[in-house]
Image (cartoon, coloured by chain):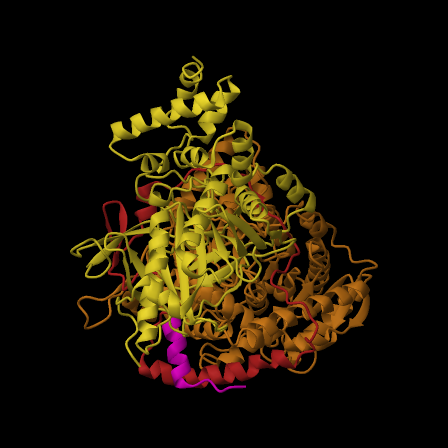
């Protein structure tokens, strides 16, 4: 099992968009190491030919008819917005288009 | 190593002499369902901003998705029309990445279990030959919101001070159709790309599943292109040119990227794997965000949605209800009407097939119907200030150039 | 009069309301008064809605006075866990990142409570986004255990357990991802059920881990819990994972309290080593009571349960890392600008907001989940955990072939002291060892009081587990045990809890 490094945690925090402080990074490297060692024991279970289980109940094909339902009003939709302008959510500049 | 994101090019013939292009196309089609993929909000184009949103498509805490049955049906019909296999069981997956126009910061999509896979589409080229494009997969996903960039000189993203987001489009059903890499197309790669997108557009229109209006973004094309030295069998590094939104642009973008890649390779450089933007006005692509290896979407099965397992008899019913494929229909009608190849091509390019078929069905002679409608469309295009192909390609909800004209028309050409 | 109204069961209140001996306004006001008196010390609530609750109470009283036939619990007030959206009332999930957020919609559970005429007293405290076993991870400070104010009330639903144990409400809602209803019930001497996954709609529950989360009822008696279960449960077309089948007959089972001939399975892996002596003792006694009531005891083995905690702490963080991505400062909630940057990008504002708005435990689990889902590690972590999940589900199936229900202690210990495990995440996680398997497999579980541990005089809970969609069996066993224990004790367990008004007066 590869050890989780400080650089790994910094990379993960970047992916998760959390601007961890240096102190938090230091602390988390240690804590996550302990937790990872413990959770890695799943690999010791007899799982060789086991089908993964993503859902607890075996339901399939739950759909709805293509019928329009009432939307929120724009006022309701925007009520929680930190900033808004022209009936739109105002967000800081976006670095680049996806 | 040479900087590999320049816009320098070499002449097309020179590029083709040294390299074989490998082409892949990803087409996103917005379905024309009444409601969004995972909620009951309307999908009307051009509505007031943020007036077609709800807790689900706005990604509010606590909201949960429910699959639009019509979206699944359309996906299966598209898959069948593309000669794909339909998965007997498949799941949705979450594609995780942060972006302000994506309310949940994951896109509900499909990953390793697409609903349709392993198909093909036969594409007729200008010289009458047929090229078979292999389809890798067609899968269901949802669209994002729309950002307007404010404060930049041109309204573009660079230099903007902030952006305004309208989430009406967020959650509209999309089908992503991905081809297998096309190898050996050689100099005809741009033409094949264009013909494929055009054929696909006609097919989707015939299925009635989408408005397929490229200029409104209901059909969008990404071009993946790489070059390998002639005779080689290992693919080169590819670029991904996003949102190429007209048939003509598809052809031009492929051509430009072939020339650009060749310029880089010929000068000893290496191509950067990246996203590029197509510029309709200048006819070039420019570098976008770099697609680094670190990009990691952390796909996993969507726990809020249960698997889709289309019943075999439902799939068979949908297969039986497919309309006649456009190419087959054209061949049949040409045979029935006795048009010359050139006449038929003009009729198809002007978008007159439906009208002539109706008019003939009403008792007109095929030759008379063709002459009358060809004149009529030229007159209308002229009145609109456009050439006939542009007029024929212009958006129309009604497949006819104007509603009700068929009734008038069927009386005139019989005389 | 007031004391009588707040110590009465929901069933008693419902009967007296229906007979119009008391009004909903009186009952609601009595509970609001109790909150004013004790919640300064207990801190069960994040938000009290006196006006709204009294308005609902008045409406119920009016309808009843007009002769309308009302649902059973109409007029009985309830406290709602702050993880459920309430239109017009703050919903924070115990997080700073949602401070001040007022949802524009009701969760299905809350909509059903309103339709059934239950006045909503307020929103109860919880560990931030339900991550924790003590409420110490709430951004708004911990709730306290009414049995000992220096101890934890359990978590994440410690607000709901303490609100019941301190008689501030007769009923409360909870959510249970790995034990957040059952463990708080155990350590406060109250009752709580995690229904079958899909039994209660998740629409409007702010998701922690979608495939594990399940809302359920909390109360002081098994019958009250059943009455609330019936109101909350049932198919909801807004939740794709909701089960489209009739709600199991939980109220009937609670009233019959019949375990004659029932096979009670003791899970070998969930007893003995690792469980506090007094916890084990009360468990053994409870099993003897069930035998006296006509049940048979069988021992079952669930060998994969030893991997349950590990699988859980991979699946939960993975799903949570994705579910909590939506908190990004763009559309609602907190927005924090990074210091020293007057032109920050959206990406920087997201990262600064999530840094400031999330607590340590939430960050830890998001990072862990991000790792477990990363390409290159997915198969080793998330993928393996999903396979273990299958093994655990298979273990349950095998166990339920020889037993009608399974039993175990709900938690390995009684309530620990605030602060004791705060700096040791793994020690905190171990509290969930007995409750987690049910969430992984989706089966229903309940915790009922089984007495006080002799060594510390604190409540102990017994856990009952049943096959999926057989929730009524929990209530049959729970009610039978409750009846025998209360007969032995001569009073409900909570009658021996300390008098909080004295503690409050002293503290004030």
Display colour for chain C: orange
How far across and how far down the image is residue B386, in percent? 27, 34
Which residues are drawn in magenta? Answer: A1-15
Residue placed furthest toward the front: B340
Q: How many callouts does the rendering have?
A: 0
Display colour for chain B: yellow
Display colour for chain A: red
Q: Is residue A9 magenta?
A: yes
How far across and how far down the image is residue C486, in percent? 68, 62
Report the front residue among B295 and B27: B27
Q: Is residue C41 left or right of residue C12?
A: left
Vertical order, A37 against B152 (above or below): below
Where residue C345 sits, quadrant-wise, is bottom left
How far across and how far down the image is residue C69, in percent? 57, 32
Q: Is residue C228 magenta?
A: no
> Image point 41% across, 52% down: which residue?
B191
Report the front residue among C81 and B62: B62
Q: Is residue C308 left or right of residue A92?
A: right
> Image point 39% across, 85% down: which residue?
A6
Where residue B410 sits, quadrant-wise, is top left
């Amino acid at each position: 099992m590869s050890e989780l490094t400080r650089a790994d945690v910094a990379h993960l925090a970047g992916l998760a968009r959390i601007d961890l402080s240096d102190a938090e990074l230091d602390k988390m490297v240690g804590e996550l190491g302990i937790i990872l060692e413990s959770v890695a024991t799943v690999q010791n279970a007899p799982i060789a030919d086991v089908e993964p289980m993503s859902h607890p109940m075996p339901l399939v094909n739950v759909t709805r008819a293509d019928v329009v339902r009432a939307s929120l009003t724009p006022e309701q939709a925007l009520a929680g917005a930190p900033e808004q302008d022209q009936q739109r959510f105002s967000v800081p500049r976006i670095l680049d288009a996806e | 190593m040479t900087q590999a994101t320049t816009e320098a090019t070499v002449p097309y013939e020179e590029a083709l002499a040294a390299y074989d292009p490998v082409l892949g196309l990803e087409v996103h089609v917005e379905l024309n369902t009444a409601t969004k993929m995972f909620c009951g909000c309307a999908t009307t184009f051009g509505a007031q901003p943020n007036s077609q949103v709800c807790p689900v498509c706005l990604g509010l805490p606590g909201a949960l998705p429910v699959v639009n049955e019509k979206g699944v049906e359309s996906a299966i019909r598209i898959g069948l029309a593309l000669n794909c296999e339909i998965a007997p069981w498949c799941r949705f997956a979450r594609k995780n990445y942060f972006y302000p126009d994506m309310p949940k910061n994951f896109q509900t999509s499909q990953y390793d279990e697409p609903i349709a896979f392993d198909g093909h589409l036969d594409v007729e080229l200008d010289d009458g030959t047929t090229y078979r494009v292999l389809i890798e997969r067609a899968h269901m996903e949802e669209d994002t919101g729309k950002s307007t960039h404010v404060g930049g000189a041109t309204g573009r993203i660079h230099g903007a001070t902030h952006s305004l987001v309208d989430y009406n489009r967020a959650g509209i059903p999309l089908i992503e159709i991905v081809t297998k890499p096309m190898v050996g197309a050689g100099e005809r790669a741009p033409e094949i790309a264009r013909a494929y997108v055009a054929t696909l557009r006609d097919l989707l229109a015939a299925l009635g599943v989408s408005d397929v209006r490229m200029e409104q973004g209901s059909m969008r094309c990404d071009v993946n292109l790489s070059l390998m030295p002639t005779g080689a069998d290992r693919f080169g590094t590819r670029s991904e040119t996003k949102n190429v939104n007209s048939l003509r642009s598809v052809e031009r973008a492929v051509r430009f990227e072939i020339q650009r890649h060749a310029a880089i390779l010929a000068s000893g450089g290496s191509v950067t794997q990246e996203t590029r933007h197509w510029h309709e006005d200048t006819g070039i692509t420019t570098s976008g965000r770099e697609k680094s290896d670190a990009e990691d979407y952390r796909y996993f099965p969507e726990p809020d949605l249960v698997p889709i397992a289309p019943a075999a008899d439902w799939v068979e019913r949908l297969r039986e209800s497919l309309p006649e494929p456009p190419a087959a229909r054209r061949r049949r009608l040409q045979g029935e009407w006795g048009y010359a190849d050139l006449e038929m091509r003009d009729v198809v390019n002007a978008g007159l097939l439906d009208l002539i078929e109706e008019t003939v069905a009403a008792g007109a002679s095929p030759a008379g119907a063709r002459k009358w409608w060809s004149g009529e469309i030229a007159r209308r295009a002229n009145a609109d200030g456009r050439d006939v192909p542009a007029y024929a390609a212009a958006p129309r909800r009604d497949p006819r150039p104007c509603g009700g004209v068929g009734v008038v028309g069927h009386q005139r050409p019989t005389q | 009069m007031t004391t009588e109204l707040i110590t009465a069961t929901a069933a008693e209140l419902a009967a007296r309301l229906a007979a119009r001996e008391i009004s909903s306004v009186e009952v609601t006001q009595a509970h609001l008064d109790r909150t004013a008196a004790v919640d300064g010390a207990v801190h069960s609530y994040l938000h009290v809605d006196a006006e709204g609750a009294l308005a609902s109470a008045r409406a119920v009283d009016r309808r009843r006075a007009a002769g309308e036939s009302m649902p059973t619990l109409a007029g009985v007030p309830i406290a709602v866990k702050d993880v459920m959206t309430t239109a017009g009332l703050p919903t924070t999930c115990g997080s700073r990142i949602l401070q001040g957020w007022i949802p524009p919609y009701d969760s299905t559970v809350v909509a059903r409570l309103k339709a059934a005429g239950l006045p909503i007293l307020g929103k109860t405290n919880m560990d931030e986004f339900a991550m924790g076993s003590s409420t110490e991870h709430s951004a708004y400070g911990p709730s306290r255990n009414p049995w000992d104010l220096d101890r934890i009330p359990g978590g994440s639903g410690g607000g709901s357990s303490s609100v019941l144990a301190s008689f501030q409400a007769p009923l409360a809602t909870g959510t249970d991802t790995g034990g957040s209803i059952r463990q708080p019930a155990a350590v406060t001497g109250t009752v709580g059920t995690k229904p079958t996954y899909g039994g209660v709609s998740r629409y409007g529950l702010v998701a922690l881990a979608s495939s594990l989360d399940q809302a359920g009822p909390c109360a002081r008696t098994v019958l009250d819990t059943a009455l609330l279960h019936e109101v909350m449960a049932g198919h909801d077309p807004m939740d794709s994972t909701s089960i489209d089948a009739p709600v199991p007959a939980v109220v009937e089972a609670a009233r019959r309290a019949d375990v004659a001939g029932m096979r009670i399975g003791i899970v070998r892996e969930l007893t003995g080593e690792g469980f506090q002596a007094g916890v084990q003792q009360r468990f053994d006694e409870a099993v003897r009571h069930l035998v006296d009531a006509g049940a048979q005891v069988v021992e079952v083995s669930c060998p994969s349960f030893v991997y349950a905690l590990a699988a859980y702490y991979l699946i939960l963080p993975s799903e949570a890392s994705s579910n909590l991505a939506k908190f990004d400062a763009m559309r609602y909630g907190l927005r924090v600008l990074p210091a020293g940057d007057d032109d920050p990008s959206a990406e920087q504002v997201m990262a600064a907001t999530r840094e400031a708005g999330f607590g340590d435990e939430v960050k830890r689990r998001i990072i862990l989940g991000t790792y477990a889902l990363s390409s290159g590690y997915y198969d080793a972590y998330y993928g393996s955990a999903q396979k273990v999940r299958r093994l655990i589900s298979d273990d349950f199936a095998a166990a339920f072939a020889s037993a009608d229900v399974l039993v175990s202690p709900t938690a390995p210990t009684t309530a620990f002291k605030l602060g004791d495990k705060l700096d040791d995440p793994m020690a905190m996680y171990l509290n969930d060892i007995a409750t987690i398997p049910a969430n992984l497999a989706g089966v229903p579980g309940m915790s009922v009081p089984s007495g006080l541990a002799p060594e510390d005089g604190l409540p102990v809970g017994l856990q009952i587990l049943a096959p999926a969609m057989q929730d009524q069996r929990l209530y049959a066993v729970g009610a039978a045990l409750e009846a025998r224990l209360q007969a032995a004790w001569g009073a409900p367990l909570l009658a021996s809890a300390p008098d909080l008004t004295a503690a409050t007066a002293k503290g004030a």
